[in-house]
Image (cartoon, grey):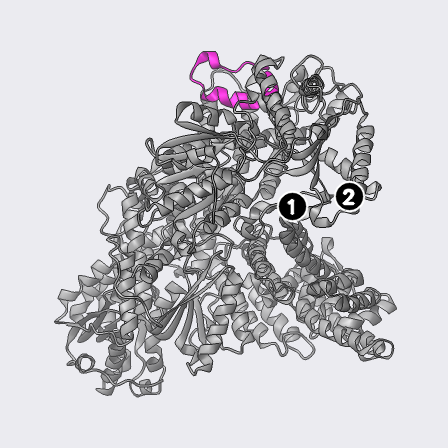
Amino acid sequence: MLQVPLTPAQISIVEAPLNARLFLSGPAGSGKSTAGVERIRWLLQQGVAGESILLLTPQRTLQEPYLELLYSPERAAGGEATPATLGGLARRAVDLFWPLAAEAAGFAHPEQPPIFLTLETAQYYMAYLVRPLLEQGYFESVSIDRNRLYSQILDNLNKSAAVGFPYTEIGARLDAAWYGDPAQRRVYADAQECASRFRAYCLENNLLDFSLQIEVFWQYLWPEPIVRQYFTRTYRHLVYDNVEEDVPRAHDLIRDWLPEFDSALLIYDEDGGYRKFLGADVETGWALRPLCDQQVTLDKSLVMSAEIARLRANLLQAISPSGKAPGGRPGPELQTIQTRFYPELLDAVAAETRRLLDEGLPPAEIVLLSPYLSDALRFSLTNRLSAYGIPVRTHRPSRSLRDEPASQALLTLAALAHPQWGIHPERFDVAYALMQAIENLDLVRAQLLTEIVYRPREARLSTFDEIRPEMQERITFLFGGQYTALRNWIMAYRESEPLPLDYFLRKLFGEVLSQPGFGFHSNFDAVRVAASLVESVKKFRQTLEPTHADLGREYLTMLQEGVIAAQYLEGWRTEQVDAVLVAPAHTFLMMNHPVSVQFWLDVGASGWTERLAQPLTQPYVLSRHWPAGRLWSDADEVAVNTESLARLTTGLLCRCKKRLYLGLAELGESGFEQRGALVRAFQKVLYHA
Amino acid sequence: MTFKPRPSQENILRYRGGRLGIAAVPGAGKTHILSALAAQIIQSGALQEDQEVLIVTLVNSAVDNFEARIKKMFENPLQALYKYRVRTLHGLAHDLVREKPGQVGLEERFSIIDEREAAFIRREAVNAWLASNPNALNDYLDPALEESRRDWVRRDQLPDLLDLLALAFIRSAKDRLLTPESLRNKLDQSPAPLPLAELGWNIYADYQRALAYRGAVDFDDLIRLALTLLENDPAYLERLRYRYPYILEDEAQDSSRTQERILSLLSGEDGNWVRVGDPNQAIFETFTTADPELLRAFIRENPHLDMPESGRSQPSIIALANYLIDWVMQAHPNPQAREALSLPHIEPVPAGYEPANPPDDPAAVRLIPNNYAPQEELEAVVKSVKAYLNSLAEVPEEARPTIAILVPRNQRGVEVIEALRKRGIEPLELVSSTSETRAAAGSLNHLLAYLSEPQSARKLARAYEVWRRDWRIESEKMELVRAVENLLRHVGNVEDFVAPRPARDWLSSLRESEPEQVVQELEAFRVTLRRWLAAVTLPIDQLILTLAQDVFTQPSELALAHKLALVLHQAAKEHVHWRLPELTSELAVIARNERRFIGFSADDSGFDPEQHRGRVVVTTMHRAKGLEWDRVYLMSVNDYDFPSNLPGERFISEKWFVRDGLNLEAEALAQLDALEANDAYAWYTEGAATAEARLDYVRERLRLLYVGITRARRELIITWNTGRQGDARPARALTELMNWWEARGV
């Protein structure tokens, strides 16, 4: 990566004394994070021990600018700086100091260790508790996918912990702000009841979801001198980036902790606040400013060209309700790609991307953004780019394991090996599993074979020898031999004592599928998926073992119902860096990484503004600043939508160096006409200048 | 574009604001005048920044029609960009709800299930109810039925009957903004038991729970929720009123209470709301809450204009239609049926204006008095069509007339089609989804069908044809396609082509006997085919996209495939046990179902009779609405399909196995009504609704006949038959028309 020399302002921040506490603010692209990175480097160079540096961010992706340094050879000199989030700190504290808090926090079995829930396992338990209530008529007035219902109840709990109000007030707070259809009111009471039951169940079984981790940490551990000492002694220097994207509880913690650090650098993006819907609070973040010894501002963009800066100003004006005519028509920095149909737009975008690369632009300097990235869109776009030979990365949780052919094959074989589960795979699933499991087996023969050997009702697999000779010949003896080996292995396993699912998968993989002649022998993608699956199953088992039996079967059922999505992030640190990025717009913002060219697909979509529509939760009403009892009105909603659109789009432009392409298909992905607020704002920029 | 408005149209263009009701006649050019009015409003500069003229119409194809016409009225289309919005009521409701879904208990990306999926869910709810209440309806069965017969009725007849009842009940409850919960409260407070309303509630509640489980709403919910939003969110309503300062509503005779309420709220008390419609054309194929009285009342109570001129039909046909209006209004034997039709009369276009009516030709109106048996009627009509087509043999295609046979119900249409085919005439079926949608979906369907059964040589050959679908037009390539297709069909073991072993390589063996060109073609196909076969383990959406990239070139087809991918992805999520065969058949059904394709309508511009000159279109009178043909046959105009509520008539909704000839659907709705009535005199009386439903049906059927007659431009032939039992008579209205026609002495 090209090293741009630091500005004098940045240098004075980087080289601030070893006992300085600085609050650095400014717009995106003014070099704040660069100063943060260099500050850590400088601290290390000054002989500060790496382990004593805490790098705090609201979420892990925001650490991206620091990673190169964190994992560079320089760190070796003085050990590793610790990258962390509030959740990570809380979990570590609970893990280390569990006996100090367990009883006081109300856990039923303080003598036993805590069990930390992931998002998935929390969702699993929530489903387990809420499902019977649904049968009783809970949530009847909302139309919502069940899995999202569970996740919104969890989200409410997390907000109560992150914002800092008792979880027992969730329903009342939401209800007090409601002014719409009275029939909807009762869902808040239902949501409260579910949250309360979930909390009680967690306390009963030593389970800690995110909200309990934060609460236990904040209420019972942080006040303990021994816990506090542990943290304050370990960490002497703080770099806290994206303060504005963090939750009030994190700000409370730092407010408390700040005086103990030798040095601190708090970095605040003045245009930020993109995580409001996750509970982020710019105001409590800004309140940390006066607590620092020195307040520094960087206000000159080092990213945007003058033209992009002007476009940003114009767009901001066009979005704002005052609606003043923006000045000056945009030049070549703003390009429009307009088509009637959606796939045409994707073609044009891929072709233009190719052209830009041919002109010499590095792939990493281009991003393709959309407010929402459906599987179909991601697939279509990456296919088109790959067809041009363009390296692509997509920053988004990948397909669910449910949708990965390799994991489907493994789970089908698992069901066949465990007839006691009573899960009888469909014939198609078995054919596909054989196709995956046996190297080079084509679909035609896989289906022929399955037709003959598999009886779904009894989940029975007959032998290859029983097949008529002419059919054996069609299937070939080579594939027949491999089938026989696989079948014998399954039959032998059926006779033995069943293993936990993750052990089973490892064994199946190690003893059969990874061997020569079998499908995973040279298919590295499949191996990667298999490893993710084993990991997911293992976590599931470790969390649920205390409360449930027969977890293999449960895992399959839950995966099928989508209660556990088993999504896994493709190792985002290791993935190819010099590639065109395809991502949802918000994800890109949270990566904190400027590029030369941005494509905004779906400029007409309404998704650029509307992010609030969740029937069971409401980030603004549950924030710290919402006056008790005030109604959430249409005007609030319009104001918030306008503000979030302005924040999102100007935030994106702050991370754009040279050019913006607007992609507009008259009929969007689902065939609906597109005319959201963003395209209207651009219309003003383009035609009313 | 030059547009010379007729005098009555000029009146409408003088509109400046406020409410206006317009009664138009068939062929009056409603779309045209509303488009002109919209363009005029935009050109006048009456709109502020962020304001739009809102045009509401009935069906998707009309949306495109409006779009196209309005665009043509501007030299620079950018002048009108984002200045108007054309929506069906469902489209409008979707816009309204999508802006604030959380407010009505929906997620940001809520899904909308189409009518087919809704029907499937409803059927499940009906079956579940019947299974757990097998004897609950005993009281409604004819006591004279023998026990064995009763069992058969329960098993065989009740599910269908209850399904229709449930459809009507749920739709009506939603039209009244009743949720299962609020309806339950009302039932609990009811002073007397209402068993049919209880039944309806049970199925409704079950149905709604199933929707909520999917995070989905149906089309009626969309409208219900839109109205709920407007009624509960005054600030939002205010914002919308600013956004849509003018509302132009087409086909207003098909408006329901809810639709009227939504538009009335949106336009505000003193708002600008123009409603155009023809109350005489309010006809409905399935149960609906629409009511032409609403438009009539609006016209009575507000400033109003007529659009009586129509250039469609020749004067004799106009005279016949006008006489039907007069007779119904003044002399229909059933006084309560007299409101079925209303004025104005149809008037020909004045000289000097376009389009001019065809010349008068009284001989071209033929009302056939013969009392044909149903089969004889078929034969007579087919014979007449055959002779007519023969007489056109020498006429060049573009000069041939357009021809339609219109029937009162689908089943009759099927019989007509069969009869035509027997005489070597290939008719055109008018189906709701357009050919492009069906062709594209059909192609994907063939590919998926092969992938479901990859060892089938026949399906392999079909998949190949799909792959080369663009070659069909070039005769030279067509020969190659035929040859290759034929070879594939006889491949024997498909794996010897797809993944051959050295000893049994089918393609290599062909190199001796077949031309190089054929072998190359097969090689090329095999490369693609292997890619498809490897893609079967992908999620269905990605499989579809992969296939589409290989077989489609047209942007609209690719867009359609993308949409199909999303829809099937959703279907696969909802039915986790579905595999390729189930998804394949789902795709086939989707292809027939137009409403999923809200939005792709632009290229699905409805059926255009002009595209099929010299062919015979067979369809129902209902589906013929909005269309016209040079020569029209109206069949089965007897007193079973067009009753007058006279003694001896049978009614289709009164089932023989139900006691006292009750119409259970109507009775269930009346019980729902009773729950809402505050007045003890309005309380439910059994049988009253059945009688009222008869009258509604009589009225609807009179309008249907009027619509049928006014489809004809130059020639009209009306026949009737004696029905399945041989005792049907000509419809009373037809007898009247025949007498009058004869008396007219032409």
Q: Position of residue A244 (x, y in %)?
A: 25, 64
**Label 1: chain?**
B
Label 2 and label 1: CA atoms lie apart by: 16 Å
Secondary element type, mark 1: helix
Nearest the eye: A175 or B437: B437
- Residue beneath label 2, please? B392
Q: What's the residue type where badge 2 is placed?
A: Leu
Q: Is residue A180 left or right of residue A125?
A: left
Residue that appears at 37% across and 40% down: B246
- Please say if the residues under marks 2 and 1 sit with CB atoms less than 8 Å apart: no
Sooner in the amino-acid sequence: mark 2 or mark 1: 2
Image quarter (top left, top right, bottom left or bottom right) of the C terminus of chain B: top right
- List the residue tagged with mark 1: B610
Q: Please tell me whether residue A376 is drawn above or below residue B199 in the rendered image.
A: below
Locate residue B423: give its quadrant. Answer: top right
Q: Is residue B530 left or right of residue B290?
A: right
Marks 2 and 1 share the same chain? yes
Whether residue B58 is situated above or below residue A47 in the rendered picture:
above
Which residue sits at x=71%, y=31%?
Answer: B364
Q: Does any portion of residue A500 appear in the rendered image?
A: no
Q: Is residue B670 magenta?
A: yes
Q: Nearer the viewer, residue B416 or B170?
A: B416
Report whether A587 appears left or right of A302: right
Q: Nearer the viewer, mark 2 or mark 1?
A: 2
Q: Quadrant of residue B552?
A: bottom right
Residue B652 visible from this viewpoint: yes
Q: Which residues are magenta?
A: B668-696
B530 and B383: which is toward the camera: B383
Q: Residue at x 73, y 34 (%)?
A: B411
Instruction: Bin the neighbour count of mark 2 within 10 Å (Cα to Cα): few under 14, some 14-19, many 20 and up.
Output: some
